[in-house]
Image (tube, helix red, strand yellow):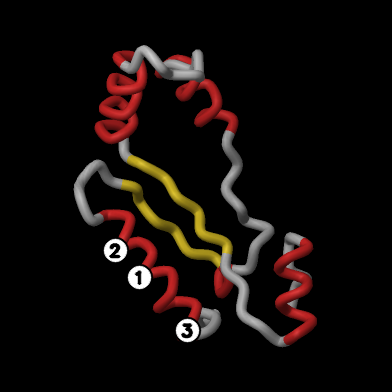
């Protein structure tokens, strides 16, 4: 079994506790919608725009160093209740233990 990738993961594994990397992504429509809202917000603190997002996304590397049994992919959405559903999915996965290899 490969070592956990983070200090928290290592601590959880040493205690025999569960750990899970939650990799959250979003589709293009969701990203564009969020960027448009951000651009219209006079209190925004970030100067990132869609071009910056696209450049960073192109450089992104998937977390392949994390064993699949300890990795969960979630797709973020722009709709009410999404975060509650995502939290429930993460908790359900954590309580079930590592996914089969």
Q: How many residues crowd mark 3 within 10 Å: few (<14), some (14–19), many (20+)? A: few
| Residue holding disc 3 | 95
Disc 1, disc 2: CB below 8 Å? yes
Seen in the image, is 97 located left or right of residue 81?
A: right
Q: CA distance from mark 3 to mark 2?
A: 15 Å
Identified at 29% across, 19% down, the residue is: 36
Q: Is residue 60 above or below residue 48?
A: below
In terms of depth relative to the viewer, which is nearer, 35 or 4? 35
Check disc 2 and report its element: helix, strand or loop. helix
Is 53 left or right of 13, judged from the image as shown?
left
Contact? badges 1 and 3 (CB < 8 Å)? no
Q: Is 100 situated above or below 43?
A: below
Residue 87 position within the rendered picture, expressed as x and y whole percent measured from the top left: 38, 64
Question: Image quarter for residue 89?
Answer: bottom left
- Which residue is painted at 50% across and 78% down in the image? 94
Q: Could you tell me residue 44's position as x and y percent? A: 43, 19
**Relative image position of residue 53 (x, y in whole percent):** 47, 24
- Residue at the disc numbered 2: 85
Q: Is residue 20 above or below residue 47?
A: below
Distance from label 1 to label 2 (Cα)?
A: 5 Å
Q: Where, quadrant-wise, is the C terminus in this rendering?
A: bottom right
**Disc 1 to disc 3, C-alpha distance:** 10 Å
At 73% from the left and 68% from the top, the residue drawn is: 4
Give the mark nearest the N terminus, 1 or 3: 1
Is residue 51 rendered to the left or right of residue 18? left
Q: Position of residue 97 (x, y in %)?
A: 52, 84
Residue topped by disc 1? 88
Among the two numbered marks 3 and 2 on one chain, the one whose residue lies closer to the N terminus:
2
Q: Is residue 56 above or below residue 89?
A: above
In the image, what residue occupies the spot 50% across and 13% down? 47
Q: Decide: few, some or many residues near mark 2? Use Cα within 10 Å; few <14, some 14-19, many ≥20.
A: few
The numbered disc on residue 47 is none
């Amino acid at each position: 079994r490969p070592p956990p990738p983070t200090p928290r993961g290592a601590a959880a594994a040493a205690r025999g506790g569960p750990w899970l990397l939650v990799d959250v992504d979003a589709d293009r429509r969701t990203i564009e919608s969020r960027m448009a809202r951000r651009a219209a917000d006079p209190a925004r603190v970030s100067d990132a725009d869609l071009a910056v997002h696209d450049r960073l996304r192109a450089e992104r590397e998937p977390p392949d160093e994390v064993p699949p049994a300890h990795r969960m992919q979630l797709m973020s959405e722009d709709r009410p209740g999404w975060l509650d559903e995502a939290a429930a999915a993460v908790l359900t996965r954590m309580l079930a233990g590592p996914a089969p290899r």
